[in-house]
Image (cartoon, grey):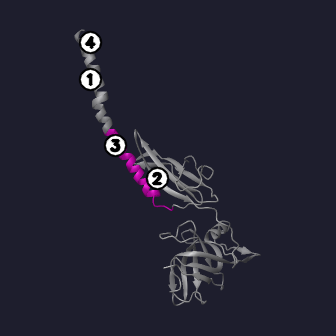
Amino acid sequence: MNKKTIGTVLALAMTASCTFGLLGCGKEYNSEKDLETVKSAIGMIDSLYGDKELITSSDYEVLGAITVRGENYPINWSIAPAGSCEINDISEFLSIGEMRADNLRTVSVTQAEVDIDYILTATVTVGKASEAVNINHRVPAKVKAHTGTAEDPYLPSNVIEIAKNLEAGAYLQADGKNQKVYVKGYVIDRGTFNSAKNRYNYIYIADSYEVGKGKDSADVIMLYTLTCDTEIVTDGNSIGVGDCLTVFGYIQKYVDKYNKEIIEVTYSGSDVVTAVDIQKAKS
């Protein structure tokens, strides 16, 4: 073998060594950078969605890609039933759409006869590095229909469904007049008490009471005002968080100055909202 051949072999050997050795160090560095990138991406996704409302009865949107240090990385979303889910195949009730031009994907939700507990998983892959975050969700079961009478009051979820068909600012009507109905729910926020006018304002009620349930939960509506003019509710000490309260008032889709829709039970003209029953929470 001549010197030129030996030199060529040595050069090839060194190239191979660099490819699998020295460049391996370079790949290790890149792998570490890729891992850092996916961890940052997953951290941002977790902060965006991990503390959001976990009970979703209607469609919602998620990001299709996440930006880290000026670069966009696609998010692979997947859905699987949780261990507590009674339905094995939930594809009939939950699906994720393709990414749109606005970088959003729609999670389509259909309610079943039972609750659907599921896990929404976001995965980001960069090179060979991959990280994921699991977010627990629930689709609540279909709400039983009620009539809004004294014998069969609406639940807050029924009120929300009714209000979906109302124009902004409109009241539920019957025969061309604002219709007064009965609504029953659990107090999650007792609002404020105006002692001068002897009434409550901004009470929030839900279908059920759970510690930590917030005003933005899927089954929550607002009682704009509640007059203390009955033996049931007499003063600022009458209502507490966790109490089951039945009221008689008007359903309205109110729109505030920020153009936010608020589903509420409120007064109409001089006709006020009154309490007809209260079951105190167990201490």
Look at the image and say whether residue 63 sits in the magenta stretch. Answer: no
**244 to the left or right of 27:** right
- Which residue, given by chain and number where applicable, does mark 4 sit on? 5
Pick whichever of labels 4 and 1 is earlier in the sequence.
4
Q: What crowding class fits label 2: few (fewer than 14 Cα within 10 Å), some (14-19), or many (20 or more)? A: some
- Residue at 52% across / 90% down in the picture? 196
Q: Quadrant of residue 153?
A: bottom right
Residue beneath disc 3: 33
Q: Amino acid at mark 3?
A: Lys
Q: CA distance from mark 4 to mark 2?
A: 58 Å
What percent of the width, then of the height, locates residue 260? 56, 68
Q: Which mark is residue 14?
A: 1
Tell me which label, 3 or 2, sits earlier in the chain. 3
Please state if 260 lies on the left or on the right of 166 as rendered: left
Please report whichever mark, 4 or 3, sits nearer to the chain's N-terminal start. Answer: 4
Identify which residue, 273 or 100, lies in the foreground: 273
Question: Looking at the picture, how far across and down is residue 192, in whole percent?
Answer: 50, 82
Magenta stretch, residue numbers: 29-53
Residue 81 as seen in the image, left or right of residue 160: left
Residue 124, how many percent across, how many down?
A: 44, 45
Amino acid residing under circle 2: Asn
User: Quick one: SS at disc 2?
Assistant: strand
CA gap, disc 3 to disc 2? 23 Å
| Residue 28 appears in the figure | yes
Circle 4 crowding by C-alpha within 10 Å: few under 14, some 14–19, many from 20: few
Tell me if residue 209 comes above or below residue 279 in the rendering: above
Residues at discs 4 and 1 in contact (Cβ within 8 Å): no
The kind of residue on which mark 1 rests is Met
N-terminal of the pair, mark 3 or mark 1, is 1
- Kindly report the distance in space between the C-alpha atoms of the residues bearing marks 3 and 1: 26 Å
For the residue labelled by badge 1, is the local secondary structure a helix, a strand or a loop? helix
